[in-house]
Amino acid sequence: MSQGKVLIAAPIHPVLAEGLTAAGYQLLPAEQVTQATAPALLAGCVGVITSTRLQLDRALLDAAPLLRWIGRMGSGMEVVDVAYAAERGIQCYSSPDGNANAVAEHALGMLLALNKRIVVSSNEVKAGKWLREDNRGTELEGKTVGIIGFGHTGRAFAKKMLGFDVQILVYDKYKQDNMPGYVTHSTLAQIQREADIISFHVPLQEDTVHYFDEKFISGMHKGFVLVNTSRGIVADVNAIRNGLEAGKITGACLDVWEEEPLERMSGPKRAILEDIMKRDNVIVTPHIAGYSREALYKMSEVLLKKIVSI
């Protein structure tokens, strides 16, 4: 028995495609779907699988009168008007547990590469330079790591840090129970007072826009490394640039940006971004922290289990 049509507007693993087909859904792959072409494609669909490509706002949801569910590859439900979807009786599913490990590994990898000057020294050796003293690294052992946001990715990152003999301070405005024994549930003020490393793992919502700003930096008691693998707009690029310039931010690992891809950023913000990226104590990647091959499978499997249980 046919369950109806499903628009596939994001890369998925075959396990999800095969599972939905077996459950009776007819899949409409749309690799080049855009906000402009989505209304026509969604008109006859009962479901949609999306990532960050579409903004499922009120207008787009109104173009899909048959829609029963939305599956989000990854976390971050800011791409969906969840409140309006609820009014319409549309179920919304995400899969943050599917890519949490990938994000945690990436954050750790960036941090190690920064502290050990791996990227800089590798490029120098390839250019014929052999500069050992200039590339003396910094160890993680003995440092204090402040994790802001302790959902799936924050917990996964803390678990990775456990083996480096660091003190792990955790602050989460909402999740304050079931803390593992190897972390210390702290206040934001304590993190700002003690942390050598700040790593953001918060969702994008009204109270996290520019969470990291000039005021946040001024509250830090010592120089620190910034890691952001959450959402770009969580950290104000102007504050990052000023913090690096003043030496308060001793290094930055940035996987996410206020506007993506970066070609969309222009004007003063573009100049600030270029100033940030040219620095040796900054490592940047193109929003790929949760983009591992394994995560694609895990997120697909998580969504399939949630969707077929409807």
Image (tube, grey):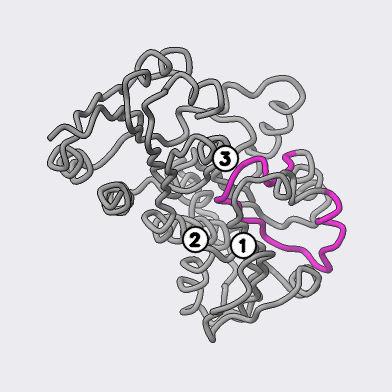
* Of pointers 3 and 2, the one earlier in the residue sequence: 3
Q: Residue furthest bottom?
A: 181
- Return the x and y of residue 124 as percentages of the image width and height: 50, 46
Q: CA distance from mark 3 to mark 1?
A: 16 Å
Position of the N terminus, as image quadrant, is top left
Which residue is pictured at 87% across the width and 57% down the height? 218
Position of residue 298 in the picture relative to residue 290 (left or right): left
Magenta region, residue range? 214-237
Position of residue 300 in the picture relative to residue 171 (left or right): left
Q: Give the image quarter of residue 259.
A: top right
Find out whether the residues at labels 3 and 2 contact each other: C-beta distance under 8 Å: no
Q: Is residue 228 magenta?
A: yes
Which residue is pictured at 12% across the width and 41% down the height? 22
Find residue 184 and name its label: none
Helix, strand, or loop for circle 3? helix
Residue where numbered disc 1 is placed: 149
Q: Residue type at mark 1?
A: Gly
- Return the x and y of residue 108 as percentages of the image width and height: 49, 62
Find residue 78 and name its label: 3
Find residue 153 and name its label: 2
Helix, strand, or loop for circle 2? helix
Which residue is pictured at 62% across the width and 48% down the height? 282
Instruction: Give the total of numbered labels.
Output: 3
Position of residue 236 in the picture relative to residue 32 (left or right): right
Classed neighbour count for the residue bearing mark 1: other residues with Cα under 10 Å, few (<14), some (14–19), many (≥20): many
Find out whether the residues at labels 1 and 2 contact each other: C-beta distance under 8 Å: yes
Which of 1/47 is in front?
A: 1
Classed neighbour count for the residue bearing mark 3: other residues with Cα under 10 Å, few (<14), some (14–19), many (≥20): some
* Of pointers 3 and 1, the one earlier in the residue sequence: 3
